Amino acid sequence: MKTSIATVCLSGTLEEKLQAAATAGFDGVEIFEQDLIVSPNSPEATAALAAELGLSLDLYQPFRDFEGVDDEQFAANLTRAEAKFQLMSRMGMTTILLCSNVATATIDNDEVVVDQLRRLGDLAERYGINVAYEALAWGRFVSEYDRAWDLVKAADHPRIGTCLDSFHILSRGTNLSRIAEIPGEKIFFLQLADAPALSMDVLSWSRHHRVFPGEGSWDLTDFLARVAGTGYAGPVSLEVFNDSFRQADTQRTAVDGLRSLRWLEAATADQVSEDNDPGSTSGTPAAAGAGRVRLDLQRLPEVAEPRGVDYVELGTDDLGALTRQIHQLGFRFVGFHRTKPHVQLWRRGQARIVVTESAGVDPVESEPSGAPTGSGTHLHGIGFAVADADAAINRAILLQATEVPRDQAHDEEILRGVFAPDGSEVFFGNGTGIDPTWTEEFGNVPDDRRSAIDHVNLAQPAHHYDEAVLFYTSLLALHAQVSNDVPSPSGLVRSQVMASSDGTIRMPLNLAPRSAETSTTGGYPEHVALACDDIFTAAETAVSRGLDFLPVPENYYEDLEARFDLAPDLLKRLRANNILYDRDGSGEFLHFYTSTIGSVFFEMVERRNDYQGYGAPNAPVRLAAQHRRNAGR
C-alpha cells in the first residue's frame, strides 16, 4: 500500500516536513499550498528535494471556491486554476484537490456545476492534470460525498474524479453504502483522519481535533475496506488538522502517522481476507467488493492480548524510602539480580516489582527524548506476559517502535522491549501464568497469595497522549474505553483506559492539566494498583509496618454514609484505615493509597463480585489530598 501524508499534519518548515516524512518511511506527500507559498525555495527546488528524498508529490491542495458561481466569477476562477496547473507542471505534479465551494457559491444547480466541472476538466487536460473533487462537510451546497460523486459522474470527464475523505464523510454520519458504486479509477485520491467523539460544529471539529487512524472513535478499518473494494489503487494519505500535532516534534509525529497507517493497513488486510473467505459468515458491508481489491495490503505479525502484567519496574535514587514502602504493602524481597547488583525483585503473590537503583547509573544514551532519567523515583517500565514474545517485538518494530538496548549475560533470559511514547519501556515475555523464567536470575521466594497487579495508571504529556492510545492499541491489541474527565485542584484530568477484553490488563492513561505538568511540587504522579482479597488485612499489615497512608478527610466519610447504606462497623473500619469505597450494580470496590515518592505512589484494591471500574467517584478525593500533601498543607 502506497502511503502518503499531507504536509499540514506536521510542524516545521516545508523542507523539515519533507525530511521527516522520508525518514519515517512514507512513500509520498501532499503539498499543502501554504507550506509552499511561505517557503524560500522555488517549486522546482522543492520538487528536486522530494525526489532526492525518494518522495512522490501526490497531491497539490487545496483549490477552493470554484463551482456554483456566475459567469464572471467562473472566468476568474478558471484563470486562477490555470495558474495552479502551471505551477504544478513546474513541480511534476498531476493531481489537485478541488474542495466543494464554501464561500462564493450562489447557484445551487447541478447542471451549472456539472458544466463548470467539465470545463475545468478541459483546461486540466491541456496540462495533464487530474482534478479530485471533494465534498467538504461544511460546503455551501455540496457537503456529502455521494452528491459530489453524482456531479462527477454527470460531468463524465476523464480529468474529473472524486476525493474521498474519511473526516468529511464520517463526521456527517453519511450512509457509506454508495461508496461501492464508485469505480476505483474515478477515485482520484483518498484521505484519512480519525477523530474523537465530540459534540461541536463540524468546522471546529475538523480544524482542531482530527487525529491519526486508531487514535479516535471511528471504524476506519471498515471505511478503508469499502474504498479498497471499489478497486482503488492510489495513495492512502493522512490529512490531519490538530493543534497538538502542529506543535509537536516533526519527526516523531511523522513516525506516529506512519504507524497508524501500517496498523490500519494490517487490520484492513485481515478484514478483506475474511470477506474473501468463502466460508466466512462475517457479513460485513465491505464484503461485496472484496474481490476487486487492488491495494497491496500487507499484514503484521498477529498478536493476542497480553495474558497479564509480568512486572512493573521502578527506577529510584531513594532506595530506602521506596523499598520500605513496598515492604509495608506486604511485598517480600526476592533478591538482587545475579549480575546487576543495583537491580532487585520484590513480590506479593503474582505482583512483581523490579526496583532499579539509579544513583550512579548512567542513562542509556539512545533513550528517546522524554525518557525517565536517573533522578527521583519514577515508573521506568512494564513487562507484559504475551503468548509469543518474538511476534510481539517483530510487530512493534514494524510499527516504527524503537527497541530498548539491553545488556545481558549469555545465560540470562532474553528479554526484548521498546520505548513507549512517554519514554518508559514496554517489554514482552512469554507468559504462562506461573513464575516466568527470568525471575530465577533473582532467586526463588515462593508466594501463593492471591495478589496481582490490578492496573497501572500512566501520566501522559499532552503532545503524546493520542500517540500513546495508538501505541497500546496497535502493539498490544488493547482497547480504548470511553474517556472521562476528573476534577482536580489543578484542573480537569482526562483519563482513558486501555484494557484487554477480559480485564486482565487495565491501564488508565491520564492527560494531566498543563499546570500540573509544570508544577514545582512534583507534577502529575503515576501509580501501581495492587489487587488483594482482603483490604482490611492488607491495611492492618501496612499500619503495623508504619505505612504513610494518603489521608482521607472526614467529610468524605460523612458523604459516604449519606450515599450508601453501609453497616456502622464497616464504615468505622473504612475510617480507621483511610479506605475509600464505591459500589455499582455489579459489585463493590475498596481501596487505599500511599503517599507519593518522587512521581510514584501505590494503591491497594479489593474488588468484590464483578466490579470493573476504578472508583472514579473517589478520584477527586485522592487528587485533592495529594495536592495538599505536595503543597505541604
Image (cartoon, grey):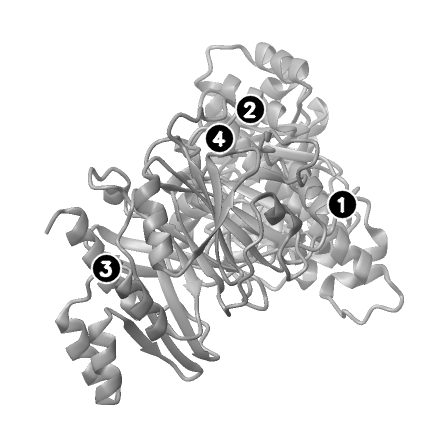
Q: Name the side, left or right, on which 507 lies relative to 96.
A: left
Residue type, numbered disc 1: Tyr
- Label 2 environment density (alpha carbons within 10 Å; few <14, some 14–19, many ≥20): many
How far separated are the C-alphas under marks 4 and 2? 9 Å
Q: Is residue 560 above or below residue 302?
A: below
Nearer-the-camera pick, 558 or 108: 558
Q: Give the labeled residue for mark 3.
A: 550
Q: Nearer the viewer, mark 1 or mark 3?
A: 3
> How far apart, in angstroms, are the residues tagged by discs 2 and 3?
46 Å
Q: Which residue is mark 2?
A: 20
- Please give the label number shown on residue 10: 4
Please say whether residue 97 is visible from this viewpoint. yes
Residue 629, image x, y percentages: 17, 51
Residue 368: x, y in percent? 49, 29
Figure quadrant of the N terminus: top right
Q: Which mark is residue 232?
A: 1
Q: Amino acid at mark 4?
A: Leu
From the image, state whether disc 4 or disc 2 is nearer to you.
2
